[in-house]
């Protein structure tokens, strides 16, 4: 099973709201990722968690706050967003570095379509 | 830093025709390369990956790609296009050799399949 689930599928929020995106995987992966994808653009990396610790933050504004409460779950907390933050937010997961193999294939969820009014 | 360039933002083929989507990479170390497909309003699905085991890689849905080091290319092909192949295709490179567990994507190629 290579399934990554994301909830909700769609989210509409005002600029003063607080909301959270949720991502879950049960593949035993220990690396999890958040990407942001604007229309007609490739995904852009936001955050990487490895063994539940934040390992990469691509200078994302503090109005986005990631959280990895356990090895299966990844959250993205949203607060005081701007209309330009409207996008598809993708979660992905992968095995961490395997001995002798310098790659970790990422499996993506279906995404959350976020609209900020 | 590693990068990929996808030549052609739009490719249109007739149903049954050969599909060729181009990807060139730039890397100072042996790369790990991926092709993903994205259907409208969906996430990304892995088509295939190159991890140095074999230069010709076969993926799902009849797609394959050949790693050519001399040309720094990893083009995606399919002998006969199907209407269901219409989607956005992304080539990506893993930056794993530098310790960053993340993908860098090309700009994408939208494939249209004409009946």
Image (cartoon, coloured by chain):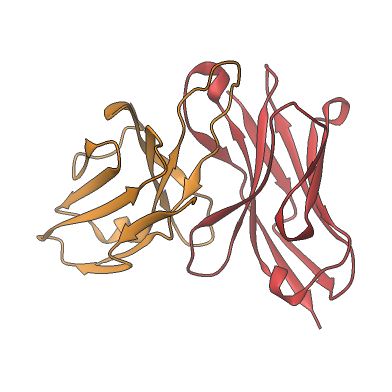
Q: Colour of chain B?
A: red
Q: Residue at x 57, y 18 (%)?
A: B97
A9 to A74, vertically: above or below: below
Determine the colour of chain A. Answer: orange
Tell which residue pokes out farthest to the bottom in this image.
Answer: B115
Q: Is residue B77 left or right of residue A74?
A: right
Pick the residue in front: B54 or B38. B54
Residue located at (39% from left, 37% from top) = A28
Q: Position of residue A69 (x, y in %)?
A: 19, 38
Is residue B3 depicted above or below A86 in this figure?
Answer: above
Answer with the quarter of the image where residue A29 lies. Answer: top left
The percent position of residue B107, horizontal first and vertical second, equals 61, 49
Q: Could you say which is closer to the camera, residue B89 or residue A4? A: A4
| A60 relative to A18 in the view: left or right | right
Horizontal side of residue A8 vs B64, given as left or right: left
Give the image location of residue B25, x and y in percent. Answer: 71, 33
């Amino acid at each position: 099973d290579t399934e990554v689930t994301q909830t909700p599928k769609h989210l509409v929020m005002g600029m003063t709201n607080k909301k959270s995106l949720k991502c879950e995987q049960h593949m035993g992966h220990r690396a999890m990722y958040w990407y942001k994808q604007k229309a007609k653009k490739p995904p852009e990396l936001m955050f990487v968690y490895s063994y539940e610790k934040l390992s990469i933050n691509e200078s994302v504004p503090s109005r986005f706050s990631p959280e990895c409460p356990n090895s299966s779950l990844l959250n993205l907390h949203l607060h005081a967003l701007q209309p330009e933050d409207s996008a598809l937010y993708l979660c992905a997961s992968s095995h961490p570095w395997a001995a002798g193999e310098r790659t970790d294939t990422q499996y993506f969820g279906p995404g959350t379509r976020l609209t900020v009014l | 830093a590693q990068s990929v360039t996808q030549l052609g933002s739009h490719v249109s083929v007739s149903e049954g025709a050969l599909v060729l989507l181009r990807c060139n990479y730039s890397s100072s170390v042996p790369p790990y390369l991926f092709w993903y497909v994205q259907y409208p309003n969906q996430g990304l699905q892995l088509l295939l990956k190159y991890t140095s085991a074999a230069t010709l890689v076969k993926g799902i849905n009849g797609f394959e790609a050949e790693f050519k080091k001399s040309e720094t290319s990893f083009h995606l092909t399919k002998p006969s296009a199907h209407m269901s192949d219409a989607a956005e295709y992304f080539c990506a490179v893993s930056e794993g050799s530098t310790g960053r567990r993340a993908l860098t994507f090309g700009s994408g190629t939208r494939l249209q399949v004409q009946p």
